[in-house]
Image (spheres, rainbow, N blue to C red):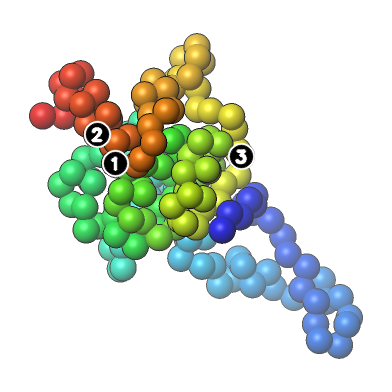
Amino acid sequence: GTYCFSLPEPCNFQSFDGYNHDKKPNFATHFPSDMQKLIQLLHSQSLSCVIRQGDVTREFTSRGILDLFTLLSTHPDFLKEALVADKVVGKAAAALMCVGEVREVYADVMSQPAHRLFEAEGIKHSYRELVPHIIRRDGKGQCPMELLTADTPSVQEAVERIRIKLNETSRIK
C-alpha cells in the first residue's frame, strides 16, 4: 500500500484509561522501524539513496539512477526484498526497483508514474511529496529518464530502454 507522511511528525500518546498523556515518549522516535532508520540516515548524511538488505546497508551519493542501475546490473540479489530510501524516485528508478524486487520504497519526492508503477507491482511505498513528474536538474522540462520510460508497458522494457540509453552515453559499458 501507499503511505504518505512527513518526518519528523510528533505523535500523541493515548493511554488505555482515555487520559491524554502528552508527556509520554513518541514511540516512533524511540523505537524507529527499519525504514525510519534508513530515512533518518538518508537525511542526516546528505545521501541520495540508502538501501538495506538484511543486515547490510549501502549508501549512495550520486544523483540520478546510475548507482541503482549499476547495483541491479552487478549485484541484483542485493535489491531482492531490500528497503530503499531515496531523495527522488521517478518512473525509471521505480522500474529498476521493481525489476530488482525490492520490498519497500520511501522517497522524499515521487512522481505519479512511479507511484502508479509501485501500485501495479504491489510494492509498498511512501513519499513526502507526490509530483506529476520529475523535472530536470536545471529545471527546464521533464527528467530525460522519466520521459524515456513514460510509455513503457512493462518494467522489463523500461529497464532495457535505460540500459540502451546509458550505453549510448558511454556511462555504462
Dot 3, crowdedness within 10 Å: few (<14), some or many (≥20)? some
Q: Amino acid at mark 3?
A: Glu
Q: Residue at x 54, y 67 (%)?
A: 32
Q: Determine the residue located farthest toward the left in the rendered image.
A: 173
For the N terminus, the quadrant is: bottom right
- Who comes first in sequence, dot 3 or dot 1? 3
**What residue sits right under mark 3 in the picture?**
129
Tell me where residue 139 appears, x and y as whole percent.
51, 15
Tell me where residue 19 appears, x and y as whole percent.
89, 81
Asked if residue 94 lies left or right of residue 111, the reply is left
Q: Determine the residue located farthest toward the front in the rendered image.
A: 153
Instruction: Report if residue 53 is visible in the image.
Output: yes
Cα distance between the residues tagged 2 and 1: 6 Å
Q: Residue 165 appears in which quarter of the rendering?
A: top left
Question: What label does residue 156 carry, if any?
Answer: 1
Q: Secondary structure at mark 3?
A: strand
Q: Residue at x 53, y 43 (%)?
A: 115
Q: Residue at x 53, y 28 (%)?
A: 133
Q: Amino acid at mark 2?
A: Glu
Q: Amino acid at mark 1?
A: Gln
**What residue sits right under mark 2 in the picture?**
160
Dot 1, crowdedness within 10 Å: few (<14), some or many (≥20)? some
Tell me where residue 78 appears, x and y as whole percent.
24, 57
Question: What label does residue 50 carry, if any?
Answer: none
